[in-house]
């Protein structure tokens, strides 16, 4: 059995979206001939709130080696765990590669700076490496006007070519996430593969007892829930959603027992969801919890809600990994996504498109509201929700692990 060294600075009990990538795929790699060996930073160096329940979701097949990191200073100058842990991860990665039989190195990003470790370790050991794009490193920031974002992109444009130049494999949550990387940096494309986050069906079988739900203090309400980060390119969708509801209220077509819960939205720097709600006179029915919730809490919230909401991105490459969580809750789903997002096809395949609002480039807010209002009006009614979840089999994390294993095998053959 071959061994892949996965370098990712966060690990359970961290409850970050990025942790799911090595966890979900690592859980199944051994079934396809690859032993996962994870190199990460000890959790005491994390800034984020820990989620001990995450331990329930990790396969015992994943061997983990921990290293140190520099602590966050006061005032906070460097928060990125990839930077704080970089010298320690580098030292330990080289030690592992010299003392053990490592056949391949796989580095999901972000943190983006750990991508450089692939090149450094390869130069010293000749072990082939691959970089996995959970998010684009070099990206469009025209809708951001802060100095930090501009500086970050300047650094990205400098470091990414160095990091990927000798990569034997480029992977990502979908091909559009990394296609521009290959276009910019390679005359001859390396081996590459796109595989979604997918989902582990076992996660959805874990039911928690004595769990407090966000709507417990509002007995008798019909909770509609959105769970996950509020994205920079989701603002138009939320504005249109609230405006549609405001118009329905004025027309007497809104059920006043409905409450809208936005949970785990994050400490985003832009205008808050609750501020948008106030703009439309909806502050009494909109509740936002910005702090992250434990992963298994979210799965249980979704399965017990009256309705589930999914607001994607106006960018067509956005894959909406939370789509699977929403669908596996088996609750009626209202979704707003770019019509070319791969998530749209998934939703259609499982017969969950009754309340799908596909966005097209340059759709105005007025146009979106006109399409969305009848969807929301119907979404309030009793719904017979007959999903066909069998098509999701090809999106499981087991299938993603198979794709990665085959891609690493191919990359080794071309070395």
Image (tube, grey):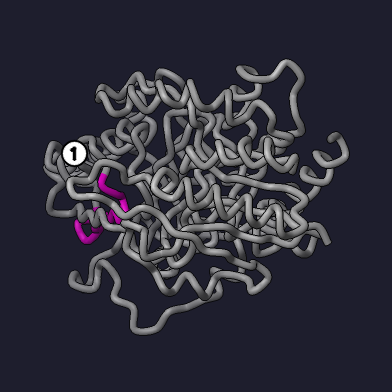
Q: Is residue 217 left or right of residue 302?
A: left
Quadrant of the snapshot with the N terminus: bottom right
Is 264 colored magenta in this rendering? yes
Q: Residue at horizontal 78%, vertical 64%?
A: 31
Marker count (numbered): 1
Residue 131, horizontal then vertical, whole percent: 62, 39
Q: Residue furthest right?
A: 413
Badge 1 marks a residue whose secondary structure is helix
The x, y position of residue 18, in whole percent, is: 48, 51
Residue that appears at 66% across and 61% down: 37
The quadrant the C terminus occupies is: top right
The reply to whether residue 344 is visible in this rendering is no
Front residue of 50/78: it is 78
Of 347 and 153, the residue lying toward us:
153
Mark 1 nearby-residue class (10 Å; few <14, some 14–19, many ≥20):
some
In the displayed structure, would residue 147 be above or below residue 331?
above
* Magenta segment includes 165: no
Res 404 seen here: yes
Q: What residue range appears in magenta?
A: 255-267
- Residue 317 coordinates in the image, percent (x, y): 54, 31
Give the residue number, with chain letter if any, for mark 1: 276
Q: Which residue is more in the foreground, 184 or 176?
A: 184
In-image side of 290 versus 207 (left or right): left
Q: Position of residue 390 (x, y in %)?
A: 69, 58
Q: Quadrant of residue 23?
A: bottom right
Q: Residue at x 65, y 26 (%)?
A: 165
Question: Does residue 291 appear left or right of residue 354 in this picture?
Answer: left
């Amino acid at each position: 059995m071959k061994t892949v060294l996965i370098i990712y600075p966060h690990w359970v009990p961290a409850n970050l979206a990025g942790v799911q990538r090595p966890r979900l795929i690592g859980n199944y790699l051994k079934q396809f001939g690859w032993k996962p060996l994870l190199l990460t930073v000890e959790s005491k160096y994390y800034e984020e709130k820990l989620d001990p329940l995450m331990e329930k979701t990790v396969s015992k097949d994943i061997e983990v080696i921990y290293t140190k990191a520099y602590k966050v200073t006061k005032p906070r100058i460097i928060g990125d765990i990839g930077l704080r842990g970089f010298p320690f991860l580098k030292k330990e990665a080289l030690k592992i590669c010299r003392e053990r039989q490592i056949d391949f190195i796989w580095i999901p990003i972000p943190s983006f700076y750990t991508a450089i470790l692939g090149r450094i370790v390869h130069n010293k050991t000749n072990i082939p490496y691959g970089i996995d794009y959970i998010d684009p490193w070099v990206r469009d920031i025209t809708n951001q006007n802060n100095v930090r974002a501009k500086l970050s992109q300047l650094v990205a444009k400098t470091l990414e070519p160095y990091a990927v130049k000798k990569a034997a494999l480029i992977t990502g949550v979908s091909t559009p996430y990394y296609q521009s990387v290959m276009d910019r940096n390679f005359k001859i494309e390396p081996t590459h593969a796109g595989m979604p986050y997918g989902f582990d069906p076992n996660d959805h079988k874990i039911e928690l007892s004595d769990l407090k739900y966000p709507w417990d203090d509002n007995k008798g309400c019909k909770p509609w829930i959105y769970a996950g980060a509020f994205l920079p390119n989701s603002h138009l969708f939320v504005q249109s959603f609230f405006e549609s509801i405001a118009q329905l209220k004025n027309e007497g077509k809104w059920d006043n027992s409905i409450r809208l819960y936005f949970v785990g939205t994050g400490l985003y720097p832009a205008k808050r969801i609750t501020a948008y709600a106030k703009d439309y006179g909806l502050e009494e029915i909109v509740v936002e919890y910005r702090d992250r919730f434990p992963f298994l809490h979210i799965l249980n919230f979704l399965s017990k809600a009256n309705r589930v909401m999914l607001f994607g991105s106006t960018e067509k490459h956005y894959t909406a990994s939370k789509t699977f969580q929403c669908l596996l809750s088996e609750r009626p789903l209202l979704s707003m996504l770019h019509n070319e997002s791969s998530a749209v096809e998934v939703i259609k395949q499982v017969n969950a498109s009754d309340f799908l609002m596909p966005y097209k480039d340059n759709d105005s807010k007025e146009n979106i509201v006109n399409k969305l209002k009848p969807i929301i009006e119907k979404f309030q009614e009793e719904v017979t929700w007959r999903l066909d979840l069998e098509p999701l089999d090809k999106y499981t994390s087991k299938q993603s692990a198979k794709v990665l294993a085959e891609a690493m095998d191919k990359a080794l053959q071309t070395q």
